[in-house]
Amino acid sequence: MNSTRKLTYGAMLLALLGAFMLIDRYLLALYFDEFVFLLQALIIIIYAAKYTFKDSVWLCIGIAALTFLFGGTTSWVYCPLAIIGGLAYSYGLLKDWERKKLLLVTFVIFIAGELLLTILIMPLFGITIEQSIQELQVSMETIFANTGTLGLISSDMLKNLMTISFGLAIVLTGGMEAMLIHLSAVILLKRFRIREIKVTPLNELKISPLYSYLAIFGVILMFFQDRFADNRLLFLTVTTFSLCCAIFLLVLGFIFVSLYGRIVLRRNIVFLVVIMLLFLPGAMYILILLGFLYGSGPLRDYLETKRGAL
């Protein structure tokens, strides 16, 4: 009876995956093909959490077969990453890894997977790194030309900046994929009453103020990076450091906005902030400042006071 249930449950998950891929292929012209690997990884995680890790390995064969039959180029390329990432996450769950270790392993797998796909696999389909960087450079040159600031930076320097941005984009993409799979697994496993994974609430997330001070220093350096233009290596190092610091403070700013809306305003205002970022250029700097004030302490203390008063 138990074996029958395993087969039935696995067949149901594979049927859902197959139905999604068929609809995407014949009705949507593979519009969602690049997101199939997320669904594949979640199916592996759900099945392994309900039964055993060994059972999920056999399920991977069915997932690979469905992808080969009904998937597009993107899902073919990303299927191995989905299987490896899903199995690694499942193994960590079954071994009761600490949440930090589970997330770290997932981050490493998906970031390394994105790097390997970009370096080794994508060129086989005619998508090279040099071509992608060249397209970014042309786009930025067009933007600079329209704003009359094209002569402020040399072509070689702009190419180096686009190379850094391209590398950061790959790392951030892998990190976002890992986080999306983790959060989706937390929600689905709890929803299906299979397993409950404890997640640290945003208001309990503790970050040393030292990182915030270091990050704001990096952001300030961004406004003086032209002084390092004579030293190419130093310029690239400062630019990379400044971009990472700005991203870090932006994330803290989003966390503050989310908590402020939930605790003080009693509503979700994150969507409104995203709209402001899209249409108000100065909104990004405001969010960076909020992230610094939250990470360094003042706004965190303010939210704690408001939360205690409720």
Image (tube, rainbow, N blue to C red):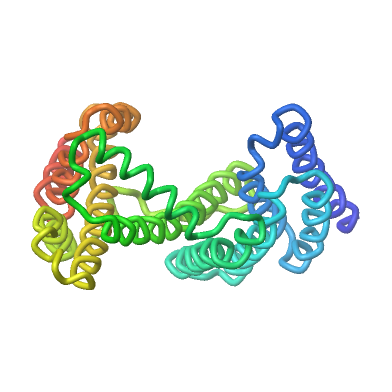
Q: Vertically, is 258 above or below 268?
A: below
Q: Is residue 169 left or right of residue 288?
A: right
Query: Could you say where residue 233 lies in the image, as x and y percent from the top left?
Result: 23, 73
Residue at left 79%, top 58%?
A: 59
Tell me which corner region of the image, top left, top right, bottom left or bottom right, holds residue 50: bottom right
Asked if 253 appears above or below 93 in the picture, the reply is above
On screen, residue 69 versus residue 218, left or right, reads right
**Residue visible at 45% across and 58% down?**
170
- Residue 278 in the figure: left or right of residue 180: left
Classify the position of the C terminus by image quarter. top left
Comparing 42 with 107, the one in front is: 107
The one nearer the camera, 25 or 38, is: 25
What is the x, y in percent for residue 279? Answer: 27, 27
What residue lies at 63% left-to-right and 63% top-to-bottom?
A: 121
Q: Position of residue 167 (x, y in %)?
A: 40, 61
- Return the x and y of residue 242 as percentages of the image width and height: 21, 59
Q: In this image, 283 relative to 108: left or right?
A: left
Front-most of 221 and 245?
221
As rendered, which of 81 and 184 lies closer to the eye?
A: 81
Q: Pick the quarter of the image with the N terminus.
A: bottom right
Q: How many marks?
A: 0
